[in-house]
Amino acid sequence: MASVHRLSEEFRRLAFSCTEKDMSLKELAQQTESRAQALLTLILAVPFLFFIPLPGLSIIFGVFIMINGLRITAKKKLWFPDILMRKRISAYSLKKAFLIAERWAIRIERLVRPRGEIFHRHPFFERVNGVMLMCCGFFLSLPLPPGTNFLPGLTTFLLSLGILEEDGYCLIVAYFIFLLVLGFYIALPIVGLEEFTSVFS
């Protein structure tokens, strides 16, 4: 099995690839090649883990996760609207962000590593992972209270991390959490949104 570039190595490579000039999202996506979708869904999932308020943006983030989950399933490249793909980001901001991400990735890599090859290399599970990302993106795009976003956000993060680090065990944990997510969203119409929100009030 070919060795996978660790996530920290990927962030360091990206940090030093954008030292000379500002880059567009399209150029940045080209730098990440086949890992672009999982990197995007990983980054977009982070705010949901820390209950960061995203007024108006949580729906957009969810839609992007949903679309790129679909594209992972269809084995297509990263998608962004053309107007965003052409938007340029300063080299300084990118380098700073990637170096911070590298430090966090080093900590995460103490727990995750390449293993359980079948769950990230077999075509069936590749499609399953894409479908689950698509479902989580749909759940995140629903206009529901912030507390409802944690589980699909966590599932998205673990799925993306498992894909990037080729960690089948991480993906298995994501599968179990996804079952909880499905159970929650199936029960929500039965229990009622008002009763759920009263728990957090």
Image (tube, helix red, strand yellow):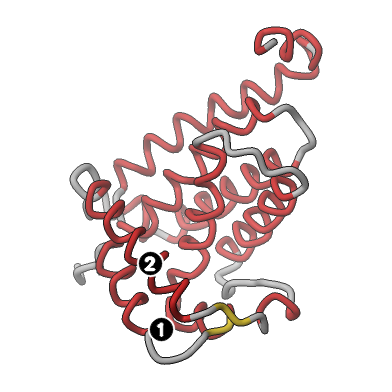
Estimate the x, y position of residue 186 in percent, counting from the top left: 71, 22
Q: Which numbered disc flags the more N-terminal residue, 2 or 1?
A: 1
Q: Tell me if residue 164 comes above or below residue 191 in the rendering.
A: below
Left or right placement of residue 86 versus residue 115 in this view: right
Q: Position of residue 162 (x, y in %)?
A: 36, 50
> Neighbour class for label 2 at 10 Å: few (<14), some, many (≥20)?
many
Residue 18 is tagged as 1
Quadrant for the N terminus in the image? bottom left
The secondary structure type at the circle numbered 2 is helix
Q: Is mark 2 in CB contact (under 8 Å) with mark 1?
A: yes
Q: Name which residue lies at 42% across and 64% down.
A: 97
Answer above or below: position of 114 versus 88: above
Write the residue at 45% across / 53% down.
Answer: 160
> Whole-percent x and y of residue 80?
67, 72
Residue 98 image label: 2
* Identity, as a three-letter code, of the amino acid under mark 1: Cys
